Amino acid sequence: MKTDLKPLPFKGPLQGISDKALMIHHDKLYAGYVAKKNEVQDKLAALEKGGDVSTANQSYSELRALKDGETFAVNGVYLHEWYFDVLGGDGTPAGPLVDALATTYGSLENFLAYFSACGMAARGWVVLAWDTHDAALRVYTGDAHNQGGVWGCLPVIVLDVYEHAYFIDYGSDRKAYIGDFWKNFDWKKANKLYSASQE
């Protein structure tokens, strides 16, 4: 199924994150993952419907390369969409997710400090997810789109900490970028994702 480029789900400037940085991030990088996801999945569709898979092996084959590229591109699309989806708010915490985070982490402040520290430790992504196996909120990190993810987990809050997300505006000051992420955070949207994970 072809994936379409989703527009940014908010309007107006963000605190600290410039329109230029956001447009490059969305219109070039994210758009590139959408295009690559479609390209790889088109090639896989041809193999699925009777293409030659006789050379498939674990060292190198067209099928192996495509399957590896598929998870990188697909997660590149999905993680960016979840990241953009929780931006555009005023950072005011409210709702059932805030209550759940306070219960799980002792306080919302503890959660924010821990999640932000994970953002400093990760090379690519920080994800607060509902872990369906543990029936609990968990923070996971990934150094690449297809590394660090845990099957059976539903993302609720996704933070991109690759340099492309902040370097134009913050240089190497990742900590300031993470601080502004929370100022621009849309708790209403995050509450919807949390509620959906509970169904």
Image (cartoon, helix red, strand yellow):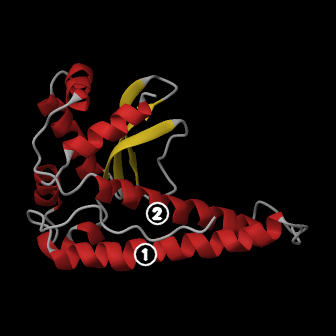
**Place of residue 105 in the rendered image (x, y in percent of width and height, measured from the top left):** 23, 25
The quadrant holding residue 29 is bottom left
**Residue 93 visible in rendering:** yes
Nearest to the observer: residue 179 or residue 191: 191
Q: Is residue 24 left or right of residue 141?
A: left
Residue that mark 1 sits on: 31
Amino acid type, mark 1: Ala
**Place of residue 195 in the rendered image (x, y in percent of width and height, measured from the top left):** 36, 32
Task: First in sequence, mark 2 or 1: give its number.
Answer: 1
174 lies above or below 139: below
Quadrant (top left/top right/bottom left/bottom right) for the N terminus? bottom right
Q: Is residue 125 left or right of residue 177?
A: right
The quadrant holding residue 160 is bottom left
**Place of residue 132 in the rendered image (x, y in percent of width and height, measured from the top left):** 49, 28
Amino acid type, mark 2: Val
The quadrant holding residue 64 is bottom right
Q: Residue at x 91, y 67 (%)?
A: 54
118 lies above or below 37: above
Cα separation between marks 2 and 1: 8 Å
**Residue 60 visible in rendering:** no
Disc 2 packing (10 Å; few <14; some 14–19; many ≥20) = many
Residue that mark 2 sits on: 77
* Pointers 2 and 1 in contact (C-beta within 8 Å): no
**Place of residue 3 in the rendered image (x, y in percent of width and height, measured from the top left):** 54, 67
Disc 1 packing (10 Å; few <14; some 14–19; many ≥20) = many
Q: Residue at x 58, y 59 (%)?
A: 71
